[in-house]
Image: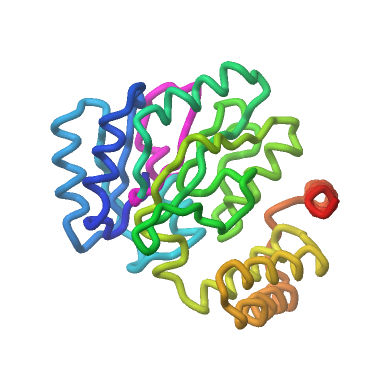
Amino acid sequence: MPAHNEGKYLRACLESFASQERQPDELLIVDDNSTDRTAQIAGEFARAHDWIRLAGRTSGSGHQPGPKVVECFEYGLSQTEQPYDFIGKFDADILLPPDYFRKVLEAFEAHPGLGLCGGHLYVERNGKTVYEPIAGPGHVRGPVKLYSKACFRTIGGLRPSIGWDMADALLARYHGFGVRTLPELKVIHMRPTGFAYSARNARLQGQALYQLRYGVGISLLSSLKMAWKRRNPLLPFQHLSGYLRAFFSGSGRLLTRQEGAFARNWRWREIRRKLS
């Protein structure tokens, strides 16, 4: 669990983990250069629960999507020797329902080919709990990823880029693993996605569209969809700026040519399915 200045949310988050019907065998919290009470809160829970551990890491300041999160996750992975059948990447600003891990593990047991699974994210708006429409309901969001060991190792872990949480699902499907969401598992996202992000990070999203080898058509449709959902008319222009910058700078790709062709075909099939 990467955590940078999550003092406002971490206690409630960890209480939801401690209240699980089926607790994780190990929860490793990586305090990433926090300047608030993140480390103190994590330490309290580590002392109270023998399956919770705290590790410290120093990196750049500020909330950043993509590389920093993945690097923090990979650091945590390097600090554990716990054998595992499933490995998860969870954010420090979520509230899990008590049956979360039990039901996700039951889904893996019921579907042997399943490689990636998670619940749906909800946010509090105007006193109501509403679905967070950042991605489609079939996409396992970044804050609640749980992978089978076979899937995680086959896809080569997570890519240190802003597009990591799309690349993993595409690679899982490419290698024949199932990807599934469980809508009945409603996870509260206490800090809505993008709350602390900037126009710079929107340009990084455009870079990710290029790195995922989506091509112009899918990238444009994805950008327009995000702009509509976020009610941000500037978003397509920011995405275009990032996409073109990545193109002209020869930015590295997250997928091989063959994987990219698979990704485009899969995305087009999904678009046609939604329009039919």
For residue 64, above or below residue 116: below
**Left/right of residue 196 with respect to residue 249 in the rendered view:** left
Question: Which part of the image, by quadrant, shows the N terminus?
Answer: top left
For the point 35% across and 68% down, the residue is 62
The picture places residue 111, in percent across and down from the top left corner, at 64, 20
Task: Find the magenta span and give its range.
Answer: 74-93
Q: Nearer the viewer, residue 263 or 273?
A: 273
Residue 87 vs 208, above or below: the answer is above
Image coordinates for residue 132, horizontal then vertical, percent:
50, 55
Residue 154 coordinates in the image, percent (x, y): 65, 32
Residue 82 drawn in magenta: yes
Which residue sits at x=64%, y=63%? 208
Q: Residue at x 61, y 26 (%)?
A: 150
Residue, x 39% and y 69% (percent of image)? 196
- Closer to the camera, 179 or 58? 179
Q: Is residue 103 above or below residue 40?
A: above
- On whether residue 80 falls in the magenta region, the answer is yes
Q: Nearer the viewer, residue 202 or 270?
A: 270
